[in-house]
Image: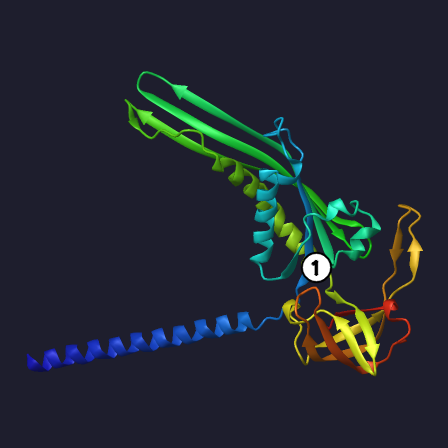
Amino acid sequence: MNHLKSTLVLCFLFLLSMGLHAQKKETKIELQVVENASSEKVLKRKVAIVRFSNETQYGKGIFYDKENDPMAKQALDNLSNKLASTGKFMLLERSDWDKIAEEGSSGYDKIGADYVIVGSITEFGRKSVGDANLISRSKVQMAEAAVSLRLIDVSSGLIIYSEEAKGEAELKTKSTLGVGGYSDFDATLSDKAISSAISQLVENVINNLMDRPWKAYFLAVDDGDIFITGGASQGISVGDIFRVKEKGKTVKNPQTGIKMELPGKEAGKIKVNFTGGETPETEFSLVQFIEGKIDENNLSNYYIEENK
């Protein structure tokens, strides 16, 4: 009998040790996955939301202030938060840019961003639907919104993405024989409907931005030191290597009448030796050429791309 007990105890200890070993192994694998994921390098694109307007008639009374539209501000904050949470973009505050530059004009090239987003709430409405009988009573509050977004490439002024999406939010209440929930007017449904519409567009905006190559530009050459735009907040680190390209020829598209730039030719490669600057707008990197060379008197004819 004692021999049987000893055998059972040994078996239990053996199984327990195997379980702990498996748990340790699993934990090790999980930590390795997290480490690999965090090591992925992302060069942030500079993006500015220059305007988000409310084009509907909802809430526009006699004292309506276009510059302080609560729905437009809520939509702008919602879009900014969704883009910032990805960690792939450097968002610039330019919500009042339309006061000094018309949409689509060459003024966008002074905004300090690679891409700008123009958004608008094109539709909004609320309604309540109820049903009542001798036994039960129900009520559904609904809010519906349509949001339009346009993504513009600052370098060309072209709209590279445009889409509209609709979102809705509802609140249901039901009571039976006087027992059950009851809800007054729910003001948060407006925000939820707008957020739902924006959520449908954000993924496409992110994909369009990340599919386009990250770019930087030459600032100056001073006593042999070469400076380019961008720094640590964009993900640039000492030791990074980038490709330098010479801008392609600008031609006029006979179908659209719009000027377009042909693909650039590779001019060399540069290595980052130092990053500096106090703010994202004033950041710079000090680089050196490891391959090729450029015409230092014509820096605007070149740009820098990620070395993939």
Is 103 on the left-hand or right-hand side of 238?
right
* Amino acid, disc 1: Asp
Quadrant for residue 307, please give it.
bottom right
Mark 1 element type: helix
Residue at x 74% of width, y 59% of height: 112
Residue at x 79% of width, y 47% of height: 101
Q: Which quarter of the figure is the C terminus placed in?
A: bottom right
Is 169 on the left-hand or right-hand side of 262?
left
Residue 24: x, y in percent?
36, 76
Outermost residue, left side: 1
Quadrant for residue 295, please give it.
bottom right
Q: Nearer the viewer, residue 91 or 70?
A: 70
Q: Pointer 1: what residue?
A: 211
- How many labels sit on residues? 1
Is 219 on the left-hand or right-hand side of 275?
right
Residue 79: x, y in percent?
60, 49
> Please, is residue 219 above or below residue 57 in the view?
below
Residue at x 36% of width, y 22% of height: 137
Residue 69: x, y in percent?
61, 38
> Please, is residue 206 above or below residue 162 in the view?
below
Quadrant for residue 303, please give it.
bottom right
Outermost residue, top side: 134
Q: Which quarter of the figure is the N terminus placed in?
A: bottom left
Residue 36: x, y in percent?
53, 73
Q: Nearer the viewer, residue 109 or 24?
A: 109
Outermost residue, front side: 63
Q: Badge 1: how crowded within 10 Å, few (<14), some, or many (20+)?
A: few
